[in-house]
Amino acid sequence: MPHYHRRPTRGESDTVYTASVITRWVRLATYFAALLGVCLYCEVIGRVWCVWLAPKGSTTRVRRANLVTRHWNVVLTNLTMALFNARLDVRGEIPPGRFVVVSNHQSTADVAILPWALRTLNLKFVAKEQLGRYIPTVSMALNHWGSALISREANRRDIPRMKAMARNLAHWDASIVIFPEGTRSRDGRLLPYKAAAVRIVAQESGLPILPIVIDGTHVASDLAGFAKQMHSARATMTIGKPIAVEAWEGRIEAVVEEIRTWAADTIASGRGDGGAQPTHWSAAGRESGATLRHRHTA
């Protein structure tokens, strides 16, 4: 006997839609309440355990600050993926050492998922000055734990700040993230890469460059996109091979453009192994990275 499916009536469809909207907003409200709780909790732990109870400049403060930052990123990102059924596929291997991480930028979420995926690298950021105020945990970490705050409109004060931060990376046992696009790409298309910040930080730190490409986070490029499209979102992060100091020295502009070309190819083709990189990038990359192993792990 044939089985017939009854189509829902208009009233039933409206009911289902209304229920889905209510569910979405309840989930969002729960998420942001939990987000605030996590940020306040880590702010208190950071202020007391890392800032007040650890001498400034001490290895104790470095170790504690890196642990709190890592804990914040792991808890926050796991919470996001659990509540929204979101997924991040990380492809490639995290090499040992410290690096100048050069990545494209699609969403505000990138600043959380990069430290989550690359947690052993103790990532620091070059961030806008506005982020250094009034954001629990985030502002504390940017102001006190090895990152650099620069003006929205580039000026001469930014260069000494970036140079000082780059020279202190060894003290923080850290790597640094540079977004050479300078802003988010809200539609997922790569913007032009600018080499200036990469050149300043790489030359001052003397570190290998680690290329990264992120794809898929642009669906939640801002708060509105986050609210509408974060549920069941899927994104990928591809970790390239280190570019040795010998491979970028004297040709930063060309290397940055090569990284952009690799990122565009990886996004367009869906390759996840980073295998399309120029061979001269990693000629001595592993040796350069291996000499800079972490002292602290968690």
Image: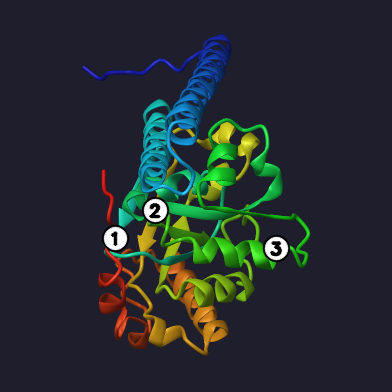
Q: Which mark is residue 94?
A: 1
Vertical order, 281 against 237 (above or below): below
The residue nearer to you, when weighing 195 against 70, is 70
Residue at the spot of label 2: 236
Marks 1 and 3 sit apart, C-alpha to C-alpha, by: 30 Å
Marks 3 and 2 sit apart, C-alpha to C-alpha, by: 32 Å
Q: Which mark is first along the chain, 2 or 3?
A: 3
Amino acid type at mark 2: Thr
Residue 233 on image: x %, y %: 45, 40
Residue at the spot of label 3: 158
Q: Secondary structure at mark 2?
A: strand
Residue 180 seen in render? no
**Residue 280 location, quadrant:** bottom left
Q: Residues within 10 Å of mark 2 (few under 14, many from 20)?
A: some
Q: Which mark is first along the chain, 3 or 1?
A: 1
Residue 254 on image: x %, y %: 54, 86
- Which of the two marks, 3 or 2, is nearer to us in this view? 3
Residue 99 on image: x %, y %: 40, 66
Q: Which mark is first along the chain, 1 or 2?
A: 1
